[in-house]
Amino acid sequence: MSTVVSPISSNPNILGGAVVFHGTRVPVQTLLDYLNDGFSVEQFVDFFPSVRREDAEEFLRLVGRPSN
């Protein structure tokens, strides 16, 4: 049996509890802002290399937003 790890997390000691990509200090809102500004997921992960592309895509899948 495998354990599913969420691509996001929230901790009151990290950025005041903002929802961030797991293991980073990058808020998920930053990805949404980049996409709204016309950047791609690929460009986002280039700017924020601590975020795994798979995590960004999984987050977008979970919130029902296309990744391209």
Image (cartoon, rainbow, N blue to C red):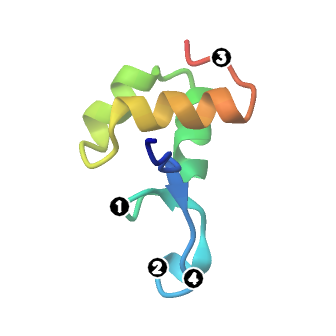
Q: Is residue 4 or residue 28 the one in the foreground?
A: 4
Tell me which residue sits at (46%, 41%) in the image: 1
38 lies left or right of 47:
right
Crowd band around label 3 with a 10 angstrom C-alpha radius: few (<14), some (14–19), many (20+): few
* Lower sequence index among marks 4 and 3: 4
Could you tell me how far apart the alpha carbons at marks 4 and 2 are, in whole angstroms? Answer: 5 Å
Q: Is mark 4 on a helix, strand or loop?
A: helix
* Lower sequence index among marks 3 and 2: 2
Could you tell me how far apart the alpha carbons at marks 1 and 3 are, in whole angstroms? Answer: 23 Å
Tell me which residue sits at (46%, 20%) in the image: 40
Callout 1, which amino acid? Answer: Gly
Q: Do tag 1 and tag 4 residues touch (Cβ < 8 Å)? A: no
- Residue at the top extreme? 68
Q: Do tag 4 and tag 2 residues touch (Cβ < 8 Å)? A: yes
Callout 3, which amino acid? Answer: Pro
Residue 66 has which mark? 3
Q: Is residue 38 or residue 11 the one in the foreground?
A: 11
Q: Nearer the viewer, mark 1 or mark 2?
A: 1
Residue under circle 1? 23
Crowd band around label 2 with a 10 angstrom C-alpha radius: few (<14), some (14–19), many (20+): some
Tell me which residue sits at (65%, 17%) in the image: 66
- Residue at the front extreme? 1
Residue 14 has which mark? 2
Q: Position of residue 41 (x, y in %)?
A: 44, 24
* Lower sequence index among marks 1 and 2: 2
* Lower sequence index among marks 1 and 3: 1
Callout 2, which amino acid? Answer: Ile
